[in-house]
Image (cartoon, rainbow, N blue to C red):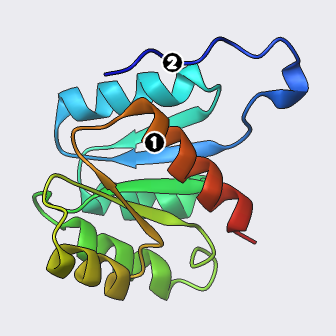
Amino acid sequence: MTKPPPEPADPETRQRGTILIADDGADNRVILERLLQLSHFDTLVAENGDEAVTMASSHRPDLILMDLAMPKTDGWEATRRIKADAALRHIPIIAVTGHVTADEIERATEAGCSDVLAKPIVYEDLVRIVRENLVTSP
């Protein structure tokens, strides 16, 4: 993992927004949460797809990082449920996966994900993808 950039001196250049992290791996949740907090994002965490759908509905995050392979309700189904809700469909969802194949990317896109982030997580890629998707969301 690479070193995070220095903290911005100007508070106006800091990130804004709340990111929901949905991942069944405790280590993955902690890593993502800490990396996002380094860039001054607020974070919420869900341990499975059912929790992700519930938290998306109740907290209305600005972006969701969705692990695809989770128990109970997987990330593909959770994404479809969120995108089916008119009040939530504007929220960008980034698929987080260790299996970045063409089929996996296609399935994630068909479910409603706007981008894919490969595991293991690289700090610069995470921040870039989050920023790009926050900027392009309505």
Amino acid bearing label 1: Leu
Distance CA(mark 2)–CA(mark 1): 11 Å
Mark carried by residue 52 = none
The vertical placement of 128 against 39, above or below, is below
Q: What residue does disc 2 label?
A: 4
Q: Is residue 111 left or right of residue 73?
A: right
Q: What residue does disc 1 label?
A: 126
Residue drawn 35% across the image and 34% down it = 122
Earlier along the polypeptide chain: callout 2 or callout 1?
2
User: Disc count in the image?
Assistant: 2
Nearer to the camera, 112 or 122: 122
Amino acid bearing label 2: Pro
Disc 2 crowd rating (10 Å Cα; few below 14, some 14-19, many 20+) is few
Look at the image and tell me in which quarter the N terminus lies.
Answer: top left
Residue drawn 76% across the image and 72% down it = 138
**Dot 2: element:** loop
Q: Find residue 55 and report its horizontal and vertical position in percent.
A: 46, 54
Asked if the residue under mark 1 is in contact with the one under mark 2, i.e. CB atoms within 8 Å, the reply is: no
Q: Is residue 33 left or right of residue 74?
A: right
Q: Is residue 3 left or right of residue 96?
A: right
Q: Find residue 123 and report its horizontal and vertical position in percent.
A: 43, 31
Disc 1 crowd rating (10 Å Cα; few below 14, some 14-19, many 20+) is some
Residue drawn 60% across the image and 53% down it = 61
Residue drawn 47% across the image and 47% down it = 20
The vertical placement of 35 against 122, above or below, is above
Q: Find residue 98 and report its horizontal and vertical position in percent.
A: 15, 52
Q: Is residue 89 visible?
A: yes
**Dot 1: element:** helix
The vertical placement of 31 against 18, above or below, is above
Q: Find residue 134 and report its horizontal and vertical position in percent.
A: 66, 56
Q: Is residue 60 visible?
A: no
Image quadrant assignment for residue 135: bottom right
